[in-house]
Amino acid sequence: MADCELCGVARPTLCPVKVNDPGVTAAYPTGTWRGINEECLESCRMANLNRIPSDARKCDLCKAGNVPLFVVKVRVPTFQEPYHREVDRAICESCFEACEDTIKRREAEKEEGHHH
Ligand SMILES: [Zn+2]
Ligand SMILES: [Zn+2]
C-alpha cells in the first residue's frame, strides 16, 4: 500500500507523476516520482482546466515555492456523512504538465491493452 501525496488515501497502486522537487534536484536532476491516486489525477486535470490561483506557499506535489500555484480540490475520506470532505491543495504549472504526461501515458497503455 502507498499513500497518495495529495489526499493521503492508501491504495495498492498509485499513478506515478514525475515532478521536479527543488529540494532534491541535486540528487535527481531529471525529476523524482510522486504517487497520487486516480481521483487526484483527475482533480489535477480539472484544476489545470480551471486554473484558480492559490495563495498557498508551495506546491503540494513538488514542494516548489515562489512559483504560481493553483487550487486543486481533493476529497479526503472521513468517517462521517458524507464520508469525505473537500480540501484545497495547491500545485504548480510544472506539476500540471507532469499530471498531463501521466494521463497520456495511462491512456496509451490502455490503447495498448485493446490491441492484445
Ligand atoms: Zn489522492
Ligand atoms: Zn509542483
Image: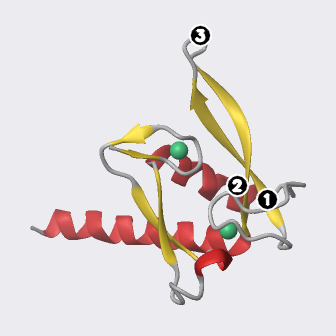
Q: Distance between the residues labelled 2 and 1?
A: 7 Å
Q: Which of marks 3 and 2 is nearer the N terminus?
A: 2
Kind of residue sitting beneath label 1: Phe
Pinpoint residue 48: horizontal percent, then vertical percent: 69, 62
Provide the residue designation for mark 2: 47
Provide the residue designation for mark 3: 80
Labels 2, 1: front one? 1
Q: Quadrant of the C terminus?
A: bottom left
Judge from the rendering whether residue 22 lies leftward or rightward of residue 50; answer left or right: left
Q: Are marks 2 and 1 in contact (CB under 8 Å)?
A: yes
Task: Give the crowd class for mark 1: few <14, some 14-19, many >=20 residues within 10 Å.
Answer: many
Pinpoint residue 110: horizontal percent, then vertical percent: 27, 63
- Secondary structure beneath dot 2 equals helix
Q: In which quarter of the image is residue 51?
A: bottom right
Provide the residue designation for mark 1: 70
Kind of residue sitting beneath label 3: Gln
Query: Eyeballing the image, is 27 above or below 74?
Result: below
Pinpoint residue 74: horizontal percent, then vertical percent: 64, 41
Kind of residue sitting beneath label 2: Ala
